[in-house]
Amino acid sequence: MECDGNKVVNNIIYGPGKNRYRYCKHIAKQRVPGLPNDLLQKGKHFILIQNPLNILSSFEKVVPPSFLELGLGDLVSIYSELCALGKPPPVIDAADLQQNPEDTLRGLCKDLDIPFQDAMLRWEAGPKPIDGLWAPWWYKSVHNSTHFASPRKYPRPFPFSFYDLLEQSLPFYNLLKRNVRQTSSLLRSPLPVPDLPVPVNAKLLAWVGDEIVPRESARVSVFDSVVQGGDAVWEGLRIYNRKIFKLEEHLDRMFDSAKALAFINVPTRDEIKEAIFRTLNANGMFNNTHIRLTLTRGKKVTSGMNPAFNQYGCTLIVLPEWKPLVYDNESGIKLVTATTRRNSPNNLDSKIHHNNLLNNILAKVEGNNANADDAIMLDKDGYVSETNATNIFLVKKGCVLTPHADYCLPGITRATIMELVVKEKFELVERRISLSEFHAADEVWTTGTMGELSPVVKIDGRITGNGKVGPVTRRLQNAYKRLTEESGVPIPTNP
């Protein structure tokens, strides 16, 4: 009898036989140290996973559950090895296989380049010649079946004595789950994987709470106040030539907003800066980068609106992306006027830079439906306040006008442009401005961190000026560009 396990396994898998395809099931935790890597390099592999939430209770009936018995760590190790060999294996979830066996198996066969057969969906009842020693225990229900059984509508009660083990194992399951072929889920049909505006952002690092994590792990608790009620403040930052433009001004506004909302246990200015610097260094992002900086009221001890439930301190999020300007600043953009009115300070003061953006989003929906770049929002009296995402300016007979900031966010870029208007020797007027004045303007532009200074060439179907970028707009664009090149807080790096 052959006693060399490697030879036995090789002979079973690759020895003589009539069948073109051989299916071999291998329990991940039983991969002994020293098993030759040529087994990984040969054939085609796929990985079957199950959510530990669903199997821990059944495990207890056969063997005491443990992280080792679940085998998820071993599966991740095997997956990583196969990826390193240039052979990333398809991953299927047992829940998908049970819920939609035909689509799941057809997809798997396509990935493995083998033909699908209807016989894969049904079998004869009873033991099988290939059953192993443990089959009477492990496969008792399978022996009684002839096809894939419909999944349970509701899960079994979870044995909470295994709660810690569930927490230990879920990260490994979730890592593999992210690579599962998409199928329909309980709540939705499968959607195509979207293309990212900047594909390289598929792999980036973000700061969440007090650590740097990969994009797919960058999540906050369902108990966080930003999830429970949009209860957070935020800033947008841009990086030019290894410097963060207007960092101090943005932090001033963030702290003012947090104070207005009565946040407590807020990180210090230096702590927030350090998180920003660490995240940028980890990503190697020193130019052409935008940061979405968010500070939530933090995690709650129980679900609800009451800020008294926030007893863990604030949650800081630093989300950097490689991001070009979001508007066409050469040819110009189109705006429409939204029916959604800008919030009044009587209801929610726009000077608080908060995350509850439904007012803006409803206007943006109108802009999208009209195939416009953005939507102008009016105040309660019908005067222009801003767009759904930016502040707005106009030029008439050489004079630059912009609405009062009573109904709009007093933007950092807005303030910068106002300073440049004066520096460039133009007259500046800040007052209430009607929509018809924007329709009749010689030039119009919007301002914001995401787009800098963006010329507007059409509003509500009306051509602005001569329909081209005007001379005042272009002059201020150039002045702003020079300013971003000259100023900003340097990003510290290792010597």
Image (tube, rainbow, N blue to C red):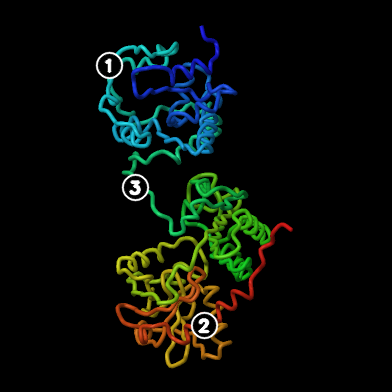
| Residue that lies at the very extreme toward the bottom in this rendered image | 397
Residue at 51%, 88% in the rendered image: 428
Q: Residues within 10 Å of mark 3 (few under 14, many from 20)?
A: few
Q: In the figure, residue 379 lies in which quadrant?
A: bottom left
Give the amino acid at mark 2. Leu
- What is the number of the mark on residue 45? none
Mark closer to the observer (1, 3): 1
Residue 282 lies, in percent from the top left, at: 62, 53
Q: Mark 2 points at which residue?
A: 476
Question: Within 10 Å of the Cα at label 1, are there few (<14), some (14-19), or many (20+) other Cα atoms?
Answer: few
Quadrant of the snapshot with the C terminus: bottom right
Residue at far right of view: 495
Disc number placed over residue 124 in the picture, else none: 1
**Height in image: 223 above or below 380?**
above
Q: Residue at x 43, y 78 (%)?
A: 455
Q: What residue type is labelled 1?
A: Glu
Percent x, y of residue 167: 54, 34
Residue in the foreground of this view, choosing between 335 and 223: 335
**x and y, in percent, of residue 375 in the image:** 37, 71
Q: Can residue 416 be seen in this view?
A: yes
- The residue that appears at 60% across and 71% down in the rendered structure is 246
In this picture, residue 335 sits left or right of residue 325:
left
Q: Is tag 2's residue or tag 3's residue first in the polypeptide sequence? A: 3
Kindly identify which residue carries mark 3.
191
Q: Residue 240 in the image: x percent, y percent?
A: 59, 68
